[in-house]
Image (spheres, rainbow, N blue to C red):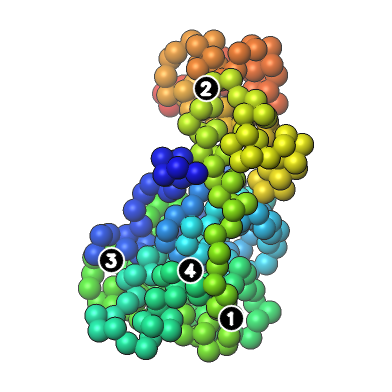
């Protein structure tokens, strides 16, 4: 996968600030559901799924989560997350592990922090309340969230929360180091040297290509050729990794683009559908109704009436 394709799937927004690359997120729901689509980033992410039910996909591993837990996303891992319950509380700390390093290179750098940065030391995938160390980690996590939220109004909408307060930053850094230390003490970190997972890179290649060329005619043979697979194997491979077939994913991506343009422009529906890769209007109307329960024109009318 060339660098431009890989960057297309990479999360663009910065987490925290340039001198303190660490941010906190809190998302709560009562009637709306959480949906974080496939992406990756260089930072480590520690998610705390405090309540609710979720489905997650991380590097082709799928998880159904029905109880309180920590979910860990290591550097460069392709992942998505969605709630399957209307009520939930999801928290996340996203940080660049470089921020944990010390000015003077020491044994902590050598044996823990540098391997963490290089991907040679990784967090486990999931840790729930059944583990005896869970409450200790949860207490440390709360110290971090409290430091971020001090003197700030937090809405629960998932907006990024960061801090420029030096004392808060010190407390956050100390608690992150303590969090890693607790994980190390209980032998929960994985020390295997991670070789690049070619299957994950293949998925990144295909998703990036779809996002760049969704408005064009795309065929299974085009997508499978990108990763040197035959069409039948590619379809099974893609569905196992993403949870839906390549065509279903492509159509859903196109429909999301259509919906955005219907909500934010007054362009004719035919033009929008053609630009988004739908060349058969009958098929487009059928797929749109299946996704939204209504027609494109009625959807636009309802969306505009909500804005006025």
Looking at marks 1 and 4 on the same chain, the residue that comes earlier in the sequence is marked by 4
Q: Is residue 20 above or below residue 207?
A: below
Alpha-carbon span between mark 2 and mark 4: 36 Å
How many angstroms separate mark 3 from mark 2 (CA)? 39 Å
Residue 35's x, y, as percent? 56, 46
Q: Disc 3 vs disc 1: which is toward the camera?
A: 1
Q: Which residue is mark 3?
A: 20
What residue is pinned by disc 2? 215
User: What is the secondary structure assignment of the residue under circle 3?
Assistant: loop
Using residue 300 as the reference point, say whether residue 98 is left or right of it: left
Choose the circle earlier in sequence order: 2 or 1.
Answer: 1
Q: Earlier in the sequence, mark 3 or mark 4?
A: 3
Q: Which residue was labeled with disc 4? A: 119
- Image coordinates for residue 251, horizontal then vertical, percent: 63, 28
Q: Which element type, helix, strand or loop, lies under badge 1?
A: loop
Residues packed near mark 3 inside 10 Å, few (<14), some (14 to 19) or many (20 plus): some
Total marks placed: 4
Between disc 2 and disc 4, the foreground one is: 4
Q: CA distance from mark 2 to mark 1?
A: 45 Å
In the rendered image, the quadrant that contains the C terminus is top left
Name the mark on residue 188.
1
* In this rendering, the label closer to the viewer, 1 or 4: 4
Q: Are marks 3 and 1 in contact (CB under 8 Å)?
A: no
Seen at 66% across and 45% down, the residue is: 242
């Amino acid at each position: 996968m060339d660098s431009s394709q890989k960057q297309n799937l990479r999360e663009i927004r910065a987490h925290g600030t340039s001198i303190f690359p660490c941010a906190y997120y809190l998302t709560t729901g009562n009637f709306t559901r959480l949906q974080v689509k496939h992406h990756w980033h260089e930072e480590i992410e520690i998610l705390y799924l405090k309540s609710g039910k979720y489905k997650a996909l991380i590097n082709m591993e799928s998880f159904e989560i029905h109880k309180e837990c920590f979910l860990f996303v290591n550097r460069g891992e392709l992942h998505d997350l969605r709630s399957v319950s209307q009520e939930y509380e999801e928290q996340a700390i996203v940080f660049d592990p470089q921020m944990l390093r010390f000015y003077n290179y020491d044994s902590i750098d050598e044996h823990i922090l540098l391997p963490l940065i290089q991907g040679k030391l990784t967090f486990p995938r999931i840790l729930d309340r059944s583990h005896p160390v869970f409450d200790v980690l949860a207490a440390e996590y709360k110290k971090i969230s409290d430091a971020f939220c001090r003197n700030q109004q937090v809405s629960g909408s998932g907006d990024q929360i960061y801090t420029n307060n030096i004392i808060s930053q010190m407390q956050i850094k100390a608690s992150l180091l303590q969090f890693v230390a607790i994980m190390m003490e209980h032998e929960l970190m994985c020390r295997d040297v991670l070789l690049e997972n070619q299957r994950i890179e293949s998925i990144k290649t295909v998703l990036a290509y779809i996002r760049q060329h969704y408005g064009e005619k795309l065929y299974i043979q085009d997508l499978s050729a990108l990763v040197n697979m035959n069409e039948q194997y590619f379809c099974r491979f893609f569905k196992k990794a993403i949870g839906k077939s390549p065509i279903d994913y492509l159509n859903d991506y196109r429909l999301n683009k259509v919906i955005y343009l219907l909500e934010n422009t007054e362009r004719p529906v035919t033009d929008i559908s053609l630009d988004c890769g739908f060349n058969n209007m009958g098929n487009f109307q059928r797929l749109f109704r299946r996704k939204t329960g209504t027609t494109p024109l009625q959807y636009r009318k309802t969306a505009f009436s909500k804005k006025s």
